[in-house]
Every structure is written in structure tokens, then in C-alpha cells.
Amino acid sequence: MPPTDNVLVSVAFGAGLLVMAGGLALRLPQEPLEPLQTDRPGRSRLLRGRRRRRASIAVLLALLGGLIPAGDIWLTAHRDPRWFAVYVLAVLGLSLWLLWLGVLEALASLARITRDDQRRSLDRRDRE
């Protein structure tokens, strides 16, 4: 069966997700060779959590980038409503999981920014 316009769109969208996942994976914070020596004891644990969340986001993006065009091509050839339901539920489940990880990353970044602002204001107050 020749590819339809819908399949070409899903292949282009999947390729875009794969490119985004690759770019995100390249920007992951690198693990230091030795443990971080900072004045804050939980800092290295926080960096590991951030790296793990961002790596999970990159992997899920890559998985969606492969699943969307592969499923669309397969469903174009084999028109089965049961597999279509499984495919849609898998894509929706992975998308919701990705959304949840993004919300957690945003909340963690917001908490870090708020904490740093509070520390700066306390340091300023102590100096005065």
C-alpha cells in the first residue's frame, strides 16, 4: 500500500521528535568524575535527580518519535480497530507520562529558583 499524506506527516512529526530528543540528550548535565564538594549537602543528589528526569524525558520523546510513524505505517497496512485502540492508548499514555515529567521538571526548577532567591535575600539581610 503506498504511503498516504497522513503517513508522511506522522513520519515528519516522528523525525522532529527524534531530533528534539537527540538535542535534549546532548544538553544533559554531565556527571562529575568525583562527588561534588559544595557547601550544600544535598546538591549532588539534586543534580542526579535533574539528570534522571531529563534523560527520561529524552527517552520518552525518542520512543514517541519512533512509535507514532511506526504505528501509523502499520495501521495503514492492517486496518484493525483493536490494534488502533491499543496504539492510541499507548501514544496517549506515553504523552501523559511525558507531560507529567515536564510538570515535575518545571516545579523543581521553580522551587530551586525560589530557594536561591530566599537565600540571597537572607544573605543580604545578614550583611546589613
Image: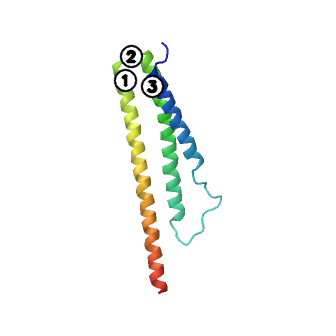
Real-space Cα separation, disc 3 to disc 1, in angstroms: 8 Å
Q: Say whether disc 3 or disc 1 marks the residue closer to the N-terminus.
A: 3
68 to 59, vertically: above or below = above
Q: Residue at x 55, y 72 (%)?
A: 39
Badge 2, how many Cα within 10 Å: few under 14, some, many 20+?
few
Q: Is residue 69 visible?
A: no
Q: Is residue 104 visible?
A: yes
Based on the displayed image, in which of its 4 quarters is residue 30 positioned? bottom right
Real-space Cα separation, disc 2 to disc 1, in angstroms: 8 Å
115 to 48, vertically: above or below = below
Query: Tag 3, which secondary structure?
Result: helix
Image position of 83 (left or right of 9): left
118 to 4, vertically: above or below = below
The reply to whether the C-beta atoms of the residues labelled 2 and 3 are less than 8 Å apart is no
Query: Which numbered circle lies on residue 84?
Result: 1
Badge 3, how many Cα within 10 Å: few under 14, some, many 20+?
some
Query: Which numbered circle lies on residue 30?
Result: none
Real-space Cα separation, disc 2 to disc 3, in angstroms: 11 Å
Q: Which residue is mark 3?
A: 71
Q: Residue at x 40, y 51 (%)?
A: 103
Image position of 39 (left or right of 77): right
Q: Residue at x 42, y 67 (%)?
A: 114
Indicate the position of residue 125 as horizontal and vertical percent values: 44, 83
Q: Say whether disc 2 or disc 3 marks the residue closer to the N-terminus.
A: 3
Q: Amino acid at mark 3?
A: Gly
Badge 1, how many Cα within 10 Å: few under 14, some, many 20+?
some
Q: Say whether disc 2 or disc 1 marks the residue closer to the N-terminus.
A: 2
Along the viewing direction, whichever of 2 and 74 lies nearer the viewer: 2
Indicate the position of residue 123 as horizontal and vertical percent values: 48, 79
Query: Which numbered circle lies on residue 79?
Result: 2
